[in-house]
Amino acid sequence: MDIKIRKAKKDDFVDILRLNRNIYKETRADPDFGDSVFLKRPSRARMVRWFNELLSEANNVNAIYLVAELDGKVVGHCFVKRERPGSELSHVGVLSMLVDRDYRGIGVGGRLLREMIKSSRKKFETIYLRVFSSNVRAKGLYKKMGFRSFGIGPRFVKRGRKYFDMEYMYLRL
């Protein structure tokens, strides 16, 4: 299995859209699935704007955007965005990662995260993330890569009538 980690590019949009839309299917099938989503699935136009803005930020100093490609298909993506550019928080990045359901548990997330950490050392001093407290698999990966927990946001996600805690984790680079 040859997982290729590379910078995201415009041609990746369709695969990224598919990944993000599949999360909505997952949360419907498994309401305990550990990723937060918008209450209403974003329109294609909104996703195009989000993707283009992220690519633009990645082309300057405010973000890094990587994808995991397998057999010519993007199966995961990860980005780190500067917390608040031009402020006293500009040395901090916020990490977000998503791996396609069918490719979890085979090393895609680890490879993507390892490369993101390596790339982030050039632009950030600290990166942090939020993860569902109940998402044991993801938290295990983050801990393995050196992230440390620094707090819990109790009942930070409300899905229907159910609440979920968010755990905050950070890594000093």
Image (tube, grey):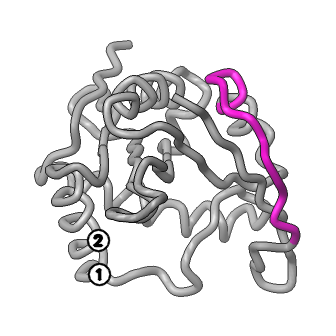
Side (left or right) of 168 relative to 98: right
| Residue at x 40% of width, y 64% of height | 87
Q: Amino acid at mark 1?
A: Arg
**Label 2 crowding class (10 Å Cα cut-off): few <14, some 14-19, many 20+?**
few
Question: In the displayed image of the protein, which residue is found farthest to the top?
Answer: 1
| Residue at x 74% of width, y 61% of height | 30
Side (left or right) of 59 relative to 76: left
**Quadrant including the N terminus:** top left
| Location of mark 2 (residue) | 50
Q: Amino acid at mark 2?
A: Trp
**Residue 123 location in percent, x, y?**
33, 38
| Residue at x 20% of width, y 56% of height | 55
| Location of mark 1 (residue) | 46
| Residue 93 vs residue 100, the one in the foreground | 93
Contact between labelled residues 2 and 1, with CB atoms less than 8 Å apart = yes
Side (left or right) of 71 relative to 165: left
| Residue 75 vs residue 135, the one in the foreground | 135
**Residue 113 location in percent, x, y?**
48, 30
Q: Which residues fall within the magenta stretch?
A: 142-154
Q: CA distance from mark 1 to mark 2?
A: 6 Å
